[in-house]
């Protein structure tokens, strides 16, 4: 896994700035949208910002985690539980 770049501003500062500009309810909504997998385009449109700004916020607030769900029939064939 590649080394993660250190942000120039810490996450808490970015979060506080976000809340100061948009409010706590919009911050909670943003986090919810991220957890639901909303696209950067959808979020950008809702918040009136660029997709790049959304990407920067996403990087500041957490990590994108992807997983691969193997079909149960394939795990049986492979002999994996």
Image: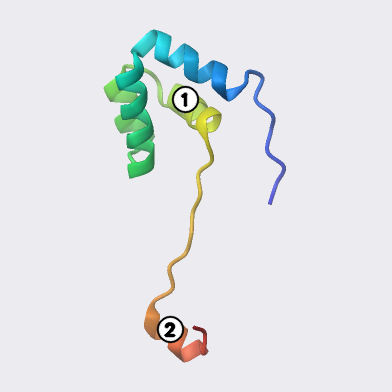
Q: Position of residue 58 (x, y in %)?
A: 48, 31
- Left or right: 27 in relation to 60: left
Q: Position of residue 41 (x, y in %)?
A: 34, 31
Which residue in the structure is indicated by mark 2? 74
Q: Residue furthest top?
A: 20
Dot 1 crowding, Cα within 10 Å, few <14, some 14–19, many 20+: few
Query: Which is more N-terminal, label 1 or label 2?
Result: 1
Q: Quadrant of residue 26?
A: top left
Q: Secondary structure at mark 1?
A: helix
Q: Could you tell me which residue is drawn at 48 percent across and 26 percent down? A: 57
Q: Is residue 37 visible?
A: no
- Front tag of 2 and 1: 2
Q: Could you tell me which residue is drawn at 46 percent across and 22 percent down? A: 53
- Left or right: 13 in relation to 39: right
Q: Could you tell me which residue is drawn at 37 percent across and 18 percent down? A: 49
Q: Where 78 sits versus 65, above or below? A: below
Which mark, by number, is residue 72? none
- Left or right: 48 in relation to 17: left
User: Which of the pair 16/60 is nearer the observer?
Assistant: 16
Dot 2 crowding, Cα within 10 Å, few <14, some 14–19, many 20+: few
Q: Residue furthest left?
A: 46
Q: Position of residue 80 (x, y in %)?
A: 52, 84
Which mark, by number, is residue 52? 1
User: Which of the pair 35/66 is nearer the observer?
Assistant: 35
Q: Secondary structure at mark 2?
A: helix
Q: Is residue 48 visible?
A: yes
């Amino acid at each position: 896994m590649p080394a993660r770049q250190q942000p120039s501003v810490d996450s808490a500062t970015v979060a506080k700035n976000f809340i100061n500009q948009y409010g706590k309810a919009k911050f909670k909504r943003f986090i919810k949208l991220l957890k639901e997998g909303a696209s950067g385009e959808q979020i950008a449109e809702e918040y009136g910002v660029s997709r790049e700004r959304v990407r920067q916020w996403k990087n500041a607030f957490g990590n994108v985690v992807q997983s691969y769900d193997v079909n149960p029939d394939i795990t049986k064939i492979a002999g994996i539980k």
